Image (spheres, grey):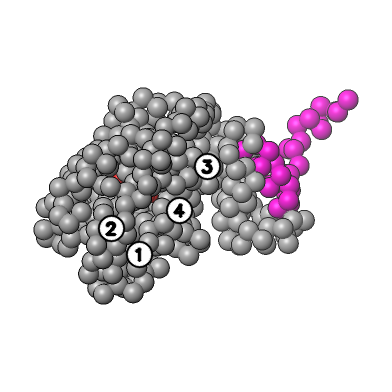
Amino acid sequence: MPSPDARKEPRPRRDWTFGELLDWTRGRFAEVGIDSPRLDAELLLAEAAGCARIDLYLRRDDLVDAAVRNRFRDMVRRRLAREPVAYILGRRDFHALELELYVDANVLVPRPETELLVDWILEDLPADAARPPVVLDVGTGSGAIALAIGRARPDARICGIDPSEAALEVARRNAERLDLHVEFRPGRAADLGRLVQTWAPPDVVAANLPYVASADLEAAAPELSYEPRLALDGGPSGLDVIEELVAAVGHLDPRPDVYLEIGADQADAVTRLLRAAGYAGVDVRPDLAGRSRLVRARRARTRDATGRGSPPAAADEEVEQHRQDDGQEQARRQGDVQGEPVPLEDQIPG
Ligand SMILES: C[S@@+](CC[C@H](N)C(=O)[O-])C[C@H]1O[C@@H](n2cnc3c(N)ncnc32)[C@H](O)[C@@H]1O
């Protein structure tokens, strides 16, 4: 039984080692349903301590000083309120870590599946073109796609467009930081015809447009509520902006090749849209989880000035395959957008 005097004494200050802080935070993040609790805890503690992630393990038994603990505590609170790690750090590595992008709440946090879209475009861009390939990134956001292509293909002529001026500022800031010559202009998908007249006819149109159905957004993972609605909301069916783009590219002459990131239940509908717009060859690729998330549409043509040209793909078989997969895809996608809002945590060590 403690004496009355002992009860009045202040509790001894708790000293935390790096290892203890990491373990506590990882456990707390896991409890509230954060997807990658260990990685997130490491990224935030490394940022607070101003060291590399690997150093956290070398310093596992070292005590964490008060200034680092204070910085870390603020970051952990934000993450427990489900703010994305990229906004807390103000940056995101994209495309095999070669591109550190500045990101804030004006732009979507670039996702790993978008790196696969970039890979596909780079695979197809001819290396020995008679003239520089011309690439247009529609809905560029942070500039992720345009800048990743620009980094890999300095010979390409690239422009990113977005209706959000705030997003364009982020994209331009990234181009400057990375010293990449990519142009960014205001515009919506529907403006493509006008843009092409004042810029250049694109060989490739790349787009990761908003594709979440408005109703699904309400039940989506809490992290999405921090991202711009303009970047996510694809209207009642999720396909409004993709339809806007496909209608616009269908009117271009010559038509560009089109590379789209789509929702996991949209491959069939988007394939039909592209074929109705006159694209003979439509191919679909999976993301890292095996879901049909990437679409390429190429028009049939003879070899052109860029040195490109290919026969249309056997799209009928692809469409049939994806029709069969569709039920499963939809079930998985519904699993993607579930999650409960979590109250702000205030029991953080430090
Ligand atoms: C899903 S985010 C993708 C951002 C970036 N391309 C990426 O992959 O990280 C979609 C982007 O499309 C833009 N957007 C919204 N409506 C659009 C429209 N009608 N035409 C073109 N872009 C649009 C948004 O502002 C947002 O930056």
Q: Are marks 3 and 2 in contact (CB under 8 Å)?
A: no
| Sequence-earlier tag: 4 or 2 | 4
Taking the image as shown, residue 319 lies to the left or right of residue 68, namely left
C-beta proximity under 8 Å, tags 2 and 1:
yes
Residue 115 found in image quarter: bottom left
Query: Horizontal and vertical percent for residue 183?
Result: 25, 63
Which numbered disc flags the more N-terminal residue, 1 or 4? 4
Q: Which mark is residue 125?
A: 1
Q: Quadrant of ligand 1?
A: top left
Query: Where does label 3 land, which residue?
Result: 290
| Mark toward the viewer: 3 or 4 | 3
- In depth, the one of 182 and 3 nearer the eye is 182
Q: Which of the two discs, 3 and 4, labels the residue nearer the N terminus?
A: 4
Q: Secondary structure at mark 1?
A: loop
Cα separation, mark 4 vs mark 2, equals 16 Å
For label 4, the SS is helix
Q: Is residue 12 left or right of residue 256?
A: right
Picture residue at 48% right of the left edge, 50% below the top = 112
The residue at label 1 has a CB less than 8 Å from ligand 1: no
Label 2 amino acid? Val
Task: Please tell me which of labels 2 and 1 falls first in the chain.
Answer: 1
